[in-house]
Amino acid sequence: MAPVGWCTKEDTAVLLGDPDAATGHRTVSIQAMNFSDVPCTLNGYPDLAFADQAGSYLAVTLVHGGSFMTTDDGPHPIEVPAGGFAITRLGWDAMATADVPVTYTLYAALYPGLDRGSWPSTLDIVAGGEVSVTAWSLTGASD
């Protein structure tokens, strides 16, 4: 159960951004949009998981922090205003995908303990890979 005043799936939509790449590095953002009439709080990191084309979860190591293409200010409580947005960014190095299952589904929840939503998303994240994830921070809708 979420602490009082925290963002929940009843008042916050979780939205997947478009992947980006540069010189062997990858990133994708996830935004949390508070669609309620009152502010809500996020603190820390989202709960993430990855699955292959058959729906089997991939053993991926999540590292809290920044990467080549992302910066992490660390976890601290943020108040997402009514109609406002928060963002987290995933970063990883390109992974060898020949003859191994790759990510076809990305699962995410605002924080551990909530049910994860999912998106079909083909990413070169494979079992045994490492993905950095930043803490939630406030952002504008266009970030």
Image (cartoon, grey):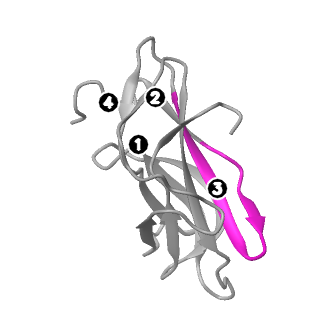
Picture coordinates of residue 126 (x, y %)?
56, 77
Left/right of residue 80 with respect to residue 75 in the rendered view: right
Q: Does the magenta stretch include residue 21?
A: yes
The residue that appears at 36% across and 30% down in the rendered structure is: 41
Q: Earlier in the sequence, mark 1 or mark 2?
A: 2
Residue at the far top in the pictured view: 37
Q: Which of marks 4 and 2 is nearer the N terminus?
A: 4
- Which residue, given by chain and number where applicable, does mark 1 sit on? 110
> Residue 103, relative to residue 6: is it above or below?
below
Label 4: state its secondary structure.
loop
| Quadrant into which the N terminus falls | top left
User: The magenta stretch spans which residues?
Assistant: 16-33
- Which residue, given by chain and number where applicable, does mark 4 sit on? 6
Tell me if I can see residue 6 in this picture: yes
The residue that appears at 59% across and 72% down in the rendered structure is: 125
Tell me, yes or no, whether the two marked residues, 2 and 3, touch with CB atoms within 8 Å: no
| Viewer-closest of 109 and 84 | 84
Q: Disc 1 marks which amino acid?
A: Leu
- Which residue, given by chain and number where applicable, does mark 2 sit on? 12
- Which residue, given by chain and number where applicable, does mark 3 sit on? 28
